[in-house]
Image (cartoon, rainbow, N blue to C red):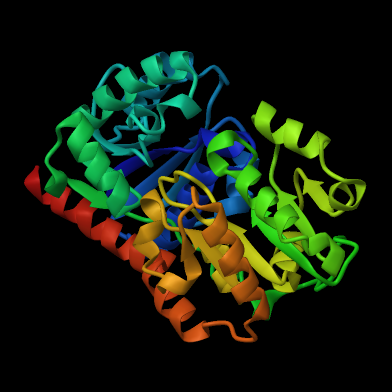
Amino acid sequence: MKKNILVDAHIFDDKYQGTRTYLKGLYSELIPIATNWHFFLVAKNIDNLKEEFGTHENLTFLPLKSSNKYYRLAIELPQIIKRHKIEYAHFQYICPLIKSCKVIITTHDILFEQKEFKHYFPLKYRIINGLLFKWSAKRADLLLTVSKFSQIKISEIYKINKQKIKITPNAVDKHFCKENLVNSTCTAGTEKYLLYVSRVEPRKNHLNLLKAFVELELSRLGYKIVFIGRKDILSRDLTTYIDLLRPVDKEAILWIDSISVDTLKAYYNNCELFVFPSFAEGFGIPPLEAMSMGSKILCSKATAMMDFNLPEALYFDPNDLEELKKKILTQLASPKVPSRIYQEILNRYNWKKIAEDYLEYLEEENSII
């Protein structure tokens, strides 16, 4: 007899973000192979879910009535779980108040709980989510996270045995590659540019990358710098720095809030160098996307990015501006992309393998009943 598992997929009603990529990649591969399980995906817009996941005999889409997260968690989801005799339910970060089945929680990261990163997050966010994330993680029958770094921090800060925290990392969709490049053109307005893909907020460290670009006078050599990602939090330091730039440097900066996947692939494909200077990440998907597209890369070696195990030549300390400048020049002068190293990394971050590991965790948990 099949086991019923509910997946809270309300994130598909909202803007694109990491948790949406995670659920799409994980369950697109899991549903076809987990024939002993029946999946119930819930969201307000189930037409969108159907487009994302397609149709399967062991998949049912259920509509949510409300967009209010408190009503969803406190009332609507417990009712759906009871009505459809759900035995397992998978949530991101926070589970419902009432526990009426086995609970799976993915806690992607708890950066806001770490002393060195707290200043990047509002006090209200830290207080509320600190309580809810910890409470949910401790109630989970199966607790997941996306990196060794997050596994260690969750274990240390929430006092949960590390062995009980399973890792289901992120990966890049198999179609996100040069072979499936639909349109090789993009709108940078130049043949040479550096690229950074990430939403804009202080911990993403756009300022140091921009400083490196300006101090190396790359604009005078015909380069531009392209930032792709919505502007969530523009720091005063960043805006002040930009205001004081020379016209030649200001004109070399291109900000893009949102683009299609095909256009994003074109930007990766055409860049001279992809740089990921973030101070702190629970995972960090864009470096994998850049590798998948064969871009030359430089990556911060802070927090979860160390899990990639890149060669030291491709890593830098995000706090060390001089190191970043030196390595940018080295990589721009390098004619080679380390494709063999990229492939070894991408083989580890593969949705099919991740889904198979996750199914193993589910079967182990199910055998305990």
- Residue 363: x and y in percent read 19, 55
Nearer to me, 260 or 359: 260
In the rendered image, the vertical position of residue 303 relative to residue 330, given as above or below: above
Q: Is residue 170 left or right of residue 36?
A: right
Kindly tell me whether residue 57 is visible in this rendering.
no
Nearer to me, 38 or 325: 325
In the rendered image, the vertical position of residue 172 relative to residue 130, given as above or below: below
Nearer to me, 187 or 138: 187
Q: Residue at x 42, y 51 (%)?
A: 283
In the rendered image, the vertical position of residue 206 relative to residue 8, given as above or below: below
Q: Residue at x 29, y 56 (%)?
A: 358
Q: Is residue 113 left or right of residue 185?
A: left
Kindly tell me whether residue 341 is visible in this rendering.
yes
- Residue 190: x and y in percent read 88, 67
Q: Quadrant of the C terminus?
A: top left
Q: Is residue 283 left or right of residue 202?
A: left
Q: Is residue 190 left or right of residue 77?
A: right
Q: Residue at x 64, y 29 (%)?
A: 233
Q: Which quadrant of the figure has residue 357?
A: bottom left
Q: Residue furthest left?
A: 368
Nearer to me, 8 or 296: 296
- Residue 125: x and y in percent read 45, 19
- Residue 184: x and y in percent read 80, 73
- Count all numbered tags in the image, as a single digit: 0
Q: Which quadrant of the figure has residue 337?
A: bottom right
Q: Residue at x 14, y 53 (%)?
A: 364
In the rendered image, the vertical position of residue 289 relative to residue 277, given as above or below: below
